[in-house]
Image (cartoon, helix red, strand yellow):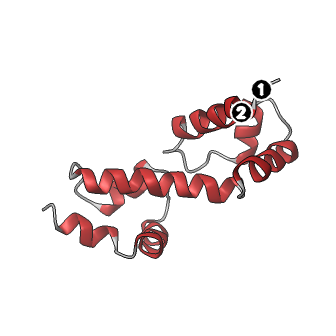
C-alpha cells in the first residue's frame, strides 16, 4: 500500500514523463498506477482537490511558463506542442487567463 506522498509522487512522475503527449489519458495513467479509472479519479480528487484533467492542465501550463520565461523557445506553437496541447489557440487562451498576459507577448520580450 502506497502512502499519500508516494501516490502523489508516482502520479506526478507519470504525468511529467508524458506531458508532451496530448493523447495520454486518465485511463493510461490509471493503468500505469495499477488502478481502475474510477478509483484513480477518486484518489486525485481526494488527495489533490481537483480533477485529473485540471491538475494535468495546470502542470502543463506551469511547464509552459518555465519554457516561455527561459528564453530558449521561439514560438508559442513550439511550446504548446511540447507540453501536450494540440491547439495553439486553446493553449494561448488558457495561458492568458491564468497568467494575465499572452505567451506571445512574453516571447516578444526575448526576441
Residue wearing tag 1: 2
Residue 91: x, y in percent?
Answer: 46, 66
Residue at 41% across, 48% down = 82
Residue 60: x, y in percent?
Answer: 49, 53
Q: Tag 2, which secondary structure?
A: helix
Residue wearing tag 2: 7
**Which quadrant: the N terminus?**
top right
Q: CA distance from mark 1 to mark 2?
A: 6 Å
Labelled pair 1, 2 in contact (Cβ < 8 Å): yes
In this view, the residue farthest toward the top is 1
How many numbered circles are shown? 2
Determine crowd level at label 1: few under 14, some 14-19, many 20+ residues with C-alpha closer than 10 A.
few
13 vs 66, left or right, is right
- Quarter holding residue 58: bottom right
In primary-sequence order, the first of circles 1 and 2 is 1
52 vs 12, left or right, is right
Give the answer, above or below, for where 31 lies relative to 73: above
Amino acid at each position: 500500500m502506497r502512502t499519500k506522498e508516494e501516490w502523489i509522487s508516482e502520479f506526478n512522475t507519470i504525468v511529467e514523463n508524458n506531458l508532451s503527449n496530448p493523447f495520454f489519458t486518465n485511463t493510461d495513467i490509471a493503468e500505469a498506477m495499477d488502478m481502475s479509472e474510477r478509483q484513480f479519479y477518486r484518489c486525485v480528487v481526494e488527495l489533490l482537490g481537483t480533477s485529473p484533467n485540471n491538475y494535468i492542465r495546470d502542470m502543463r501550463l506551469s511547464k509552459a511558463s518555465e519554457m516561455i520565461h527561459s528564453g530558449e523557445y521561439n514560438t508559442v506553437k513550439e511550446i504548446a506542442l511540447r507540453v501536450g496541447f494540440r491547439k495553439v489557440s486553446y493553449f494561448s487562451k488558457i495561458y492568458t487567463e491564468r497568467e494575465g498576459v499572452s505567451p506571445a507577448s512574453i516571447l516578444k520580450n526575448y526576441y
